Amino acid sequence: MRLAMWNLLERNVPLGLLSHPMIRGRLEQTLLEGMLLATDHTFRDALEAPPPPMRPASVKRVMDAVQELPAEPYDANRLAAIAQVSLRTLQEAFRSNVGMSPMAYVHEVRLQRVHRQLRAATPGTTTVTEVAHAWGFVHLGRFARRYRERYGESPSQTLRAA
């Protein structure tokens, strides 16, 4: 309340703090957040939740590249080059920030794309094997096991349900 009152009084002061755009912007943000925290609304939980952790730029570069071009023939060295760090640094950054290795992330993204493609396919127009091979999964037994662990059903069940 005092900050709001001070803001009202300060706004007419020539060369006062509010004449500086950076300070004025921060005060406006603080007042808005204060009002939102002081009232009950449907977005309160989201407002009070801690912000998601920021990932290092090297991890973000790799994640963005893999999301944009998941079918590319990535290997660990190529991912390290994209990240612009050493392979060991990238692996440690992925483990601590993503919870998996960079190559496991590539496989996870590809598995998501397989799932999306199987759900969108018309039964009888494609096979699980074709889709799995198109996304770089060559060992169908391992692929099917990972798919079932991730989605709770077999790839063929997803295709039939499409």
Image (spheres, grey):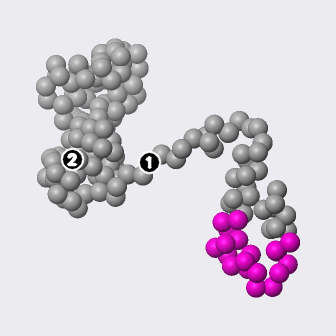
Q: In x, y percent, where is residue 21? A: 67, 76
Bounds of the magenta span?
9-27
Q: In x, y percent, where is residue 154? A: 30, 16
In which quadrant of the rendered view does residue 122 lie? top left
In which quadrant of the rendered view does residue 2 lie? bottom right
Mark toward the start of the polypeptide (1 vs 2): 1
In which quadrant of the rendered view does residue 108 lie? top left
Vertical side of 70 occupied by 16: above or below: below
Question: What residue sits right under mark 1 in the picture?
Answer: 53
Vertical side of 122 occupied by 10: above or below: below
Q: Residue at x 15, y 48 (%)?
A: 76
- Quarter of the image with the N terminus is bottom right
Q: Secondary structure at mark 1?
A: loop
Q: In x, y percent, where is residue 144? A: 23, 20
Can residue 112 be seen in the rendering of this structure? yes
Left or right of 9 in this view: 54: left
Left or right of 36 in this view: 110: left
Question: What residue sits right under mark 2 in the picture?
Answer: 91
Q: Residues within 10 Å of mark 2 (few under 14, many from 20)?
A: many
